[in-house]
Image (spheres, rainbow, N blue to C red):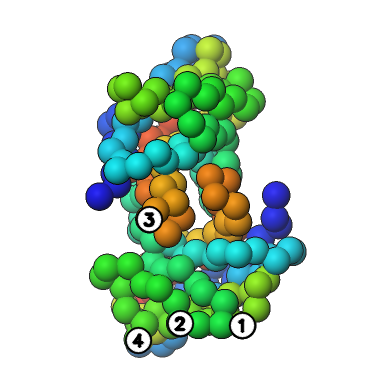
Amino acid sequence: SAVISQKPSRDICQRGTSLTIQCQVDSQVTMMFWYRQQPGQSLTLIATANQGSEATYESGFVIDKFPISRPNLTFSTLTVSNMSPEDSSIYLCSVGSLAGQPQHFGDGTRLSIL
Amino acid sequence: GDSVTQMEGPVTLSEEAFLTINCTYTATGYPSLFWYVQYPGEGLQLLLKATKADDKGSNKGFEATYRKETTSFHLEKGSVQVSDSAVYFCALREETSGSRLTFGEGTQLTVNP
């Protein structure tokens, strides 16, 4: 399976600032996804990162708050903009390829906003 | 839409006890089903999968069988260890939904020595 590296692994940020999270994969993948896991909760899909075009956002998530880039088939970034304490979560990148095959996850970025 | 329901947690067991974590799903098509595990402070790891009815996924002593008639994918292990303490997530992936994963609520398992 693909090896997925996320940076940073954790951060503590001030409210009103923005943070960009990087996701690097050791092989080309068709699909990349970004999830949010709020404290003690399950995972919620934020968006699908599309190579060469705008990301596809899920209901409740908007590009202005969570801009995503995907310049190639091995790399994507998620920015959490204008952060507030409610954005304190774990943000996870995942990758998938063939239909029916599992997605694989990075170790996540643990974000706390003061 | 698609949904996954897991048994309410948390679950606390003694070492070597039998484990069952229930998972049922609702889907419009024929999803693939997965169990993921999240150890403390880590990301999600795939534990096992099943892609069609009656498939049995297994790994590290854990098993789950894709039951289409009861729309279930219950996770079982015959003898748990302290190292199995983690959060377990049931998930489905339906290709008609853009290949996104839909997760259950997660079940916290604590195994005491």
Q: Can residue A14 be seen here?
A: no
Q: Dot 2: what SS?
A: loop
Say which residue appears at 34% left-offset and 50% top-offset. A41
Q: Dot 4: what SS?
A: loop
Question: Is tag 2's residue or tag 4's residue first in the polypeptide sequence?
Answer: 2
Q: Dot 1: what SS?
A: strand
- Spatial separation of the CA atoms under disc 1 and disc 2: 10 Å
Q: Are marks 1 and 3 on the same chain?
A: no
Which marked residue is nearer to the observer: mark 2 or mark 4? Answer: 2
Relative side of A37 to B51, left or right: left
The x, y position of residue B93, in whole percent, is 44, 47
Q: Which numbered circle lies on residue B97?
A: 3
Q: Which quadrant is the C terminus of chain B positioned in? A: top right
Badge 1 density bin: few <14, some 14–19, many ≥20, Cα 10 Å: some
The x, y position of residue A16, in whole percent, is 35, 87
Q: Are marks 2 and 4 on the same chain?
A: yes
Pointer 3 indicates a residue of which chain?
B
Pointer 2 indicates a residue of which chain?
A
Say which residue appears at 51% left-offset and 74% top-offset. A50
Which marked residue is nearer to the observer: mark 1 or mark 3? Answer: 3
Badge 4 density bin: few <14, some 14–19, many ≥20, Cα 10 Å: few
- Spatial separation of the CA atoms under disc 3 and disc 2: 18 Å
Say which residue appears at 38% left-offset and 46% top-offset. B103
Which marked residue is nearer to the observer: mark 3 or mark 2? Answer: 3
Inspect the image, locate mark 3, and give the three-letter code of the amino acid beneath it.
Answer: Ser
**Residue at label 2?**
A54
Q: In the figure, A64 relative to B53: above or below?
A: below
Q: Can residue A39 be seen here?
A: yes
Say which residue appears at 47% left-offset and 39% top-offset. B32
**Residue at label 1?**
A71
